[in-house]
């Protein structure tokens, strides 16, 4: 998940980690087309759901969580 605000990303990651999502870590990343560190977004890295499935299995739910925070989901490499 990619969010513009660090506090939102950390709060969301904490909540998802409590639910059992893994790894639910937050880091800053420059996305394609961004060339300034100040333009970097906050990424909530999720690899697996609480049931152990790939996080992409519940992408619709993640989209619903990201959208109100002006974020989106992405497959980051």
Image: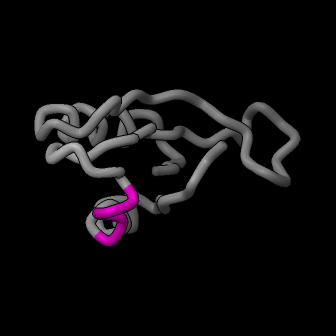
Q: Which residue shows up at 33% across the image and 60% down it?
A: 62
Q: Which residues are magenta?
A: 56-60
Q: Which residue shows up at 32% across the image and 71% down it?
A: 60
Main secondary structure type of the part rendered in magenta: helix
- Residue 40 horizontal/vertical position (percent): 68, 39
Number of numbered discs overlaid on the protein picture? 0
Q: Which residue shows up at 39% across the image and 67% down it?
A: 67
Q: Is residue 66 above or below residue 27?
A: below
Judge by depth and name the residue closer to the eye, 63 or 35.
Answer: 63
Q: Which residue shows up at 48% across the image and 42% down it?
A: 5
Q: Is residue 38 left or right of residue 57?
A: right
Judge by depth and name the residue closer to the eye, 76 or 43.
Answer: 76
Image quadrant containing the C terminus: top right
Judge by depth and name the residue closer to the eye, 17 or 12.
Answer: 17
Q: Any magenta on residue 47?
A: no
Q: Is residue 60 left or right of residue 4?
A: left
- Residue 37 horizontal/vertical position (percent): 77, 31
Q: Is residue 48 above or below residue 32?
A: above
Q: Quadrant of the rendered structure where residue 38 is?
A: top right
Coloring scheme used: one colour
**Residue ranking furthest to the front:** 53
Q: Is residue 14 left or right of residue 41?
A: left
Q: Quadrant of the rendered structure where residue 46 is?
A: top left
Q: Is residue 50 above or below residue 23?
A: below
- Residue 33 horizontal/vertical position (percent): 85, 54
Judge by depth and name the residue closer to the eye, 34 or 57.
Answer: 57
- Residue 65 horizontal/vertical position (percent): 29, 61
């Amino acid at each position: 998940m990619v969010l513009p605000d660090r506090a939102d990303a950390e709060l969301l990651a904490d909540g998802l980690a409590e639910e059992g999502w893994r790894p639910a870590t937050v880091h800053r990343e420059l996305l394609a087309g961004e060339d300034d560190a100040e333009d970097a977004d906050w990424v909530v890295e999720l690899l697996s759901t609480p049931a152990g499935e790939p996080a992409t299995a519940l992408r619709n739910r993640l989209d619903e969580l990201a959208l109100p925070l002006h974020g989106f989901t992405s497959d980051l490499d």
